[in-house]
Image (spheres, grey):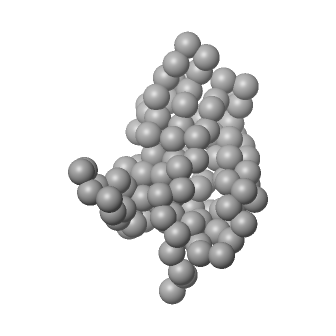
Amino acid sequence: MSVSNDVIADIAGYAAMSCYGVVGMAEQLQGAESVRLLPGQRLRKGVMVSSTEDGLVVDLHVVLENGVNMKSVCANLTSSVSFTLAEIAQIDPAHLKIAIHVDALKSRG
């Protein structure tokens, strides 16, 4: 079975958004020191998927809720995205590397 990188990015983005402490996905603005919070239908832009000899690399650019334990949220995020990709896209977690980039912190509301 072959799954496109765009579909993998969509699945990873939705899995990330279901995690406690994640406010949204982020898009780096070209040449700017700022980040834009992406609306739900554009989560894919906050996820970069690439292939290496060892498997798949998924880079998640997230905005976390201010005051959360970042280490715990990132561990939960990695676990959730890995599990969801294994369940839905049949991607072996042994051949998956997930990199979390916390691009901003934001208060909910």
Q: Say whether residue 31 is left or right of residue 3.
A: left
Q: Nearer the viewer, residue 41 or 109?
A: 109
Residue 48 in view in this figure: yes
* Relative to 54, 33 lies left or right: left
* Snapshot quadrant of residue 65: bottom right
Residue 91 to residue 61: above or below: above
Q: Residue at x 34, y 53 (%)?
A: 28
Q: Quadrant of residue 83?
A: top right
- Quadrant of image for the N terminus: top right
Q: As drawn, which residue projects farthest toward the bottom?
A: 109
Q: Write the residue at 67% across / 54% down.
A: 74
Residue at the image point whose x is 68% and y is 71% from the top: 68
Residue 41 appears left or right of 100:
left
Percent from the top left, x then y, of residue 39? 38, 67
Looking at the rendered structure, the number of numbered marks drawn on it comes to: 0
Residue 55 drawn at (x, y percent): 59, 21
Is residue 10 visible from the viewing direction of this image?
Answer: no
Give the left or right position of residue 2, taking residue 54 as reference.
Answer: left
Picture residue at 36% right of the left edge, 55% below the top: 27
Image: 15 above or below 40: above
55 in relation to 83, above or below: above
Residue with the most extreme left position: 31
Q: Residue furthest front?
A: 33
Image location (x, y in percent) of residue 61: 48, 52
